[in-house]
Amino acid sequence: MANLNFIVHDDPVGRKRENYIARVDLEPFGLEGEVEQIWLARAPGELFEVCCIPFRSYGIAFRDHVQLDDDGQYVVAVVRRQGHRVLRALFKYAVDDQRVPQSIVREIRECGLLYEWSGGRYVAIDVAPGVDPSRMVEIFDDAESSGVLFWEWGDADPFVYGNLPVGK
């Protein structure tokens, strides 16, 4: 994989001093030549715990336990889910653009959920076990109907490494 485009997490919600970074190949998700850098912490055994909210990877969420390849560079499987989900949205315009209702941005910031921004147009929100996301879904549905953003669940598709879905 030469000439990769990296999707990075500038401020991962679970960042700690002893974190690791591994890659998720985004080609199986239709993003050829792109990888997402995922922040990880040691978990029991040979596993790692996800310490960020994935922006582009499907089937993987904050706190999930994952397995890396033999070189420790790529996530190859989601071994143990921890019950978190990712709600993510791509805004049509940068969030500081006057065409984006600031009430949406305010709701994201005030919803009490962990979130991360990628650039000025993309947000990933962690929905922890037992949390009701219906208010954010309603806001995103309305904004999508108005043409402000597109949203999806990060587990709309399973995690895939290579050509085969794994860890579902």
Image: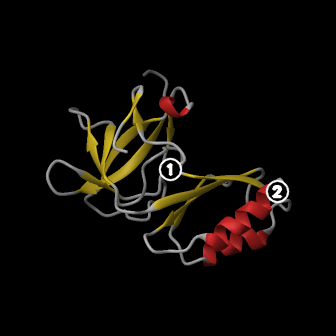
**Residue 124 placement: quadrant:** bottom right
Q: Which amino acid does label 1 sit on?
A: Asp
Residue that mark 1 sits on: 155
Mark carried by residue 23: none
Which amino acid is tagged 2?
Ser
Callout 2 environment at 10 Å: few (<14), some (14 to 19), or many (20+)? Answer: few
Q: Determine whether, in the image, residue 118 is placed left or right of residue 16.
A: right
Query: In x, y percent, where is residue 39?
Result: 37, 52
Q: Earlier in the sequence, mark 2 or mark 1?
A: 2
The quadrant in which the N terminus is found is top left
Instruction: Assign the C terminus to one quadrant of the image.
Output: top left
Q: In this view, does 89 lie to the left or right of 15?
A: right
Q: What element carries label 2?
A: helix
Left or right position of 28 against 161: right
Q: Nearer the viewer, residue 147 or 9?
A: 147
Q: In this orientation, which residue lies closer to the viewer: 66 or 13?
A: 66
Q: Is residue 134 above or below residue 87?
A: below
